[in-house]
Amino acid sequence: MVSVLILAAAGAAVAVLLLALRLWVVLHSRVLEPRQSLSLLVVAGSGGHTTEILRLLEHLSNAYSPRHYIIADTDEMSAHKINSFERNRADRDPSTMFPEYFIHRIPRSREVQQSWLSTVLTTLYSMWLSFPLTHRVKPDLKIEVSLETTMMKLRSFGKDLSGHLDFMFSRNIKQESVDDN
């Protein structure tokens, strides 16, 4: 009985320590300097989720570069959609000779028909591999299909969301005047 209490206390202490470390990392003040671009980390789901996230990114300016996409290692359809999206984006904007984007693959957290019990292990494994990737990429902004994305879509009543994103994050991007001749 005592060993269970000690183990529970140790687990709680580790959880509190990890939470405190996470809060420090998130809240630690950084000196914000104007810059030319923001790196973007896009967590793409599969199928319709990838299409939804690409629609969200469709009209973003080149100030959001480089773009890093994270997909499941077995998701070839999303990789094809992302490559096609980036090629079309480069074709529309002649100033973008070499679009800067990267596709990173991590193990899928849960396969279709996978038991819920084994999902815990595969999710932990996927998280274990995604944390170093996120640390290596060090994105300025992360976008994923989530409740927040859905709420933004509801608030905009189906309008283009890129204006919302540009407005929300433009304070960190150095604005340049463009001469239209």
Image (cartoon, rainbow, N blue to C red):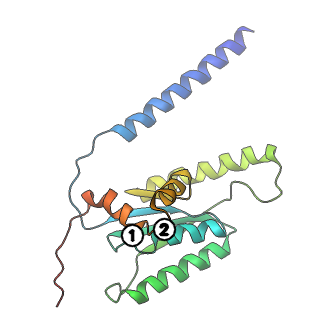
Query: Residue 23 versus residue 160: which sits nearer the camera?
Result: 160
Hey, which residue is sitting farthest top in the picture?
2
Mark 1: secondary structure: strand
**In the image, is residue 148 above or below residue 103?**
above
Q: Percent from the top left, x then y, of residue 155?
A: 46, 56
Quadrant assignment, res 45: bottom right
Picture residue at 75% right of the left edge, 48% below the top:
119
Looking at the rendered image, the quarter that the C terminus falls into is bottom left
Q: Which residue is mark 2?
A: 56
Badge 1 or badge 2: first in the primary sequence: 2
Quadrant assignment, res 48: bottom right
- Badge 2: few (under 14), some or many (20 or more) residues near its Cα, within 10 Å? some
Looking at the rendered image, the quarter that the N terminus falls into is top right
Query: Residue 111 versus residue 57: which sits nearer the camera?
Result: 57
Q: Which residue is mark 1?
A: 66
- Amino acid type at circle 1 is Pro
Q: Percent from the top left, x then y, of residue 179?
A: 16, 83
Mark 1 to mark 2 CA distance (whole Å) = 16 Å
Which tag is nearer the camera, tag 1 or tag 2?
2
Picture residue at 18% right of the left edge, 79% below the top:
178
Q: Is residue 17 visible?
A: yes
Picture residue at 49% right of the left edge, 31% below the top:
19
Left or right of residue 143: residue 71: right
- Amino acid type at circle 2 is Leu
Mark 2: secondary structure: helix
Q: Is residue 103 visible?
A: no
